[in-house]
């Protein structure tokens, strides 16, 4: 039965809900409230990351859909802002560790929430590996190393991953300082690039962003290359929910987080659109990019228009951006794992549910993500690595879709009870629009496209979704087997919060 109303009657003990116990505040769970609006915003901003969002898809976007791929950014941003509006209501109703896991769990039920968390945990853990590997490549170039073997790069990537893991394990004070530094660096870099190129070094008229670059024409372009660009741009606007993953560590989370998530997403989105427009209008040779001769148009444009010295500065900015994003992603996924362990809904719950240190962080969960992501780095030379990482983007959108569709279901039933922050009369239309968007983008991302030249890579998202879904079904059967007690610790905690703060 969906746990969607503040006035729901007590749930009797069952194999899926366990035996109700008295719970109080986050402090009773050993958590420490050490984040504010500013630090929650910094975490979400760093997770989405304008540098990662821009650099990660820019070259692929142009090759796929020509300069007009730029319009994919506002399309995806609007869709994700709809999602962030829904998430804002959900986090105000249930400000709990684990974000999408908890929201889906309370909207529909334990199993539904469990599968949401399964997709979320895998999507973010695989993203950790991708971010560490990308950061290592930029770091190698920045320090001038040449002829680096795959093993050496994997070791450097492991070092980046361990650095981020250490920051997370130390706790909030160190993590917040690093995130503030990253936020400042990314803000200066993306604004500076956009202003310099757009106003001082334009090489093309604004109309260039209406050109498909010969990739296709008319409706064929819209239904082919542009949809591919929208799928790629989806990677640029994920991670804003990370602020919700630390909800019980945020002061006044019911009021703070519904603002922090959409504000971080909007800020990053506008920065990406502004900087990418500047780069597009200042590119020295768009034809070279479309033909594949220029595989790094961002670096080429900056060096051509701003001088060769900007090359190393860009590399350093990329290392900072990717590493900060890694730290924010790991903070989010470790809390999702810890939240599942608190509910005794994942294997190894006793170990993974522990908090350590004076700042009470889930160090065992952080170590687990580092071990899994680190091990994937050493198969980076294999096609399997590409296949594994292809699920990261789909994992995000699947874990977004499940709570959004849960919210649609509850609203259509007429049983939604809002928290302190609500969209009011706009709540239902925004939720329905967000549901349409996440279904569309999830299908669009998973759609097999002949981009990799190998069939199992083109079909990689569906293969990985099926494989991890099958494994998840077996683990879920073990978790929810009749003789096993699954405690609703977080669910009961949310009821206590509702009675005290709603």
Image (cartoon, grey):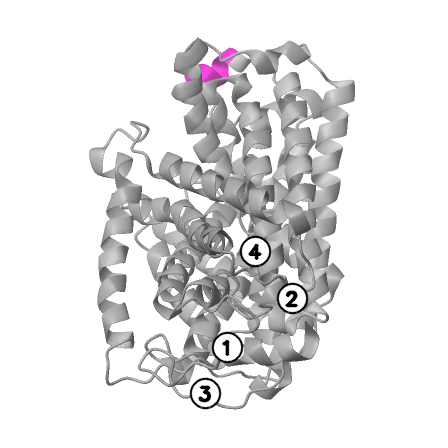
Asked which secondary structure carries label 1, the reply is helix
**Residue drawn at (47%, 67%) of the image:** 106
Measured Cα–Cα span from mark 2 to mark 4: 17 Å
Quarter of the image where the N terminus is located? bottom left
How crowded pointer 3 is (Cα within 10 Å; few <14, some 14-19, many 20+) is rated as some
Crowding at mark 4 (Cα within 10 Å: few <14, some 14-19, many 20+)? many
Q: Residue at x 64, y 31 (%)?
A: 273
How far across and how far down the image is residue 69, in percent? 52, 23
Predominant secondary structure in magenta? Answer: helix
Dot 2 or dot 4, earlier in sequence: 2
> Would residue 17 appear left or right of 6 to someone viewing this image?
left
**Residue 20 numbered mark, or none:** 3
On the question of residue 141 being in view, the answer is no
Residue 58 left/right relative to 255:
left
Q: Earlier in the sequence, mark 1 or mark 4?
A: 4
Mark before the other along the chain sequence, 2 or 3? 3
Q: Which residues are magenta?
A: 287-292
Residue 175 is labelled as 2
Residue 443 on image: x %, y %: 36, 38
Q: What is the number of the mark on residue 490?
A: 1
- 500 on left or right of 115: right
Total residue callouts = 4
Return the residue at label 4. 241
In this image, 493 relative to 307: left or right? left
Do callouts 2 and 4 mark residues in contact (Cβ within 8 Å)? Answer: no
Foreground: disc 2 or disc 3: 3
């Amino acid at each position: 039965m969906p746990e969607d109303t503040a006035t729901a009657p007590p749930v009797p003990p069952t194999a899926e809900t366990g035996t109700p116990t008295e719970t109080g505040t986050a402090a009773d769970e050993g958590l420490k409230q050490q984040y504010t609006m500013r630090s929650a915003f910094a975490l979400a901003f760093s997770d989405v990351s304008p540098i990662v969002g821009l650099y990660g898809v820019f070259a692929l976007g142009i090759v796929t859909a020509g300069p007009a791929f730029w319009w994919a950014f506002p399309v995806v941003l609007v869709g994700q802002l709809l999602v962030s509006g829904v998430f804002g209501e959900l986090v105000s109703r249930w400000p709990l560790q684990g974000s999408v896991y908890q929201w889906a769990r309370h909207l529909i039920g334990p199993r539904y929430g469990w599968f949401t968390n399964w997709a979320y945990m895998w999507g973010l853990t695989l993203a950790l590996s991708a971010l560490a590997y990308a950061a290592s490549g930029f770091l190698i170039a920045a320090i001038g190393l040449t002829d680096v073997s795959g093993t050496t790069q994997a070791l450097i990537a492991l070092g980046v991953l361990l650095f981020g893991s250490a920051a997370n394990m130390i706790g909030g004070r160190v993590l917040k300082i690093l995130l503030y530094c990253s936020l400042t660096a990314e803000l200066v870099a993306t604004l500076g690039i956009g202003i310099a190129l757009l106003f001082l070094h334009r090489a093309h008229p604004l109309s260039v962003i209406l050109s498909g670059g010969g990739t296709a024409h008319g409706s064929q372009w819209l239904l082919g290359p542009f949809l591919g660009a929208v799928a790629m741009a989806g990677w640029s606007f994920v991670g804003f929910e990370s602020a919700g993953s630390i909800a019980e560590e945020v002061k006044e989370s019911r009021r703070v987080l519904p603002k922090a998530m959409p504000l971080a997403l909007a800020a990053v989105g506008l920065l990406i659109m502004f900087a990418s427009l500047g780069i597009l209008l200042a590119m020295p040779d768009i034809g070279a990019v479309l033909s594949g001769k220029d595989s790094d148009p961002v670096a080429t444009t900056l060096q051509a228009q701003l001088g060769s010295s900007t090359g190393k500065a860009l590399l350093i900015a990329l290392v900072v951006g990717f590493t900060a994003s890694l730290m924010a992603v790991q903070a989010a996924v470790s809390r999702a794992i810890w939240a599942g362990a608190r509910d005794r809904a994942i294997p190894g719950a006793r170990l993974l549910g522990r908090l350590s240190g004076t700042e009470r962080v889930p160090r065992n969960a952080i170590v687990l993500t580092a071990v899994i992501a680190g091990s994937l780095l050493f198969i980076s030379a294999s096609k399997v690595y590409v296949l594994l990482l292809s699920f990261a983007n789909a994992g995000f959108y699947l874990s977004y879709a499940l709570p959004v569709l849960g919210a649609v279901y509850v609203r259509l039933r007429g049983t939604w009870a809002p928290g302190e922050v609500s969209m009011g009369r706009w709540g239902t239309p925004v939720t329905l629009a967000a549901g349409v968007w996440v279904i569309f983008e999830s299908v669009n991302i998973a759609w097999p496209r002949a981009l990799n030249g190998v069939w199992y890579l083109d079909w990689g998202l569906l293969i990985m979704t099926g494989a991890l879904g099958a494994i998840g079904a077996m683990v879920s059967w073990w978790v929810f087997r009749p003789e096993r007690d699954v405690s609703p610790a977080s669910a009961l905690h949310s009821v206590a919060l509702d009675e005290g703060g709603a």
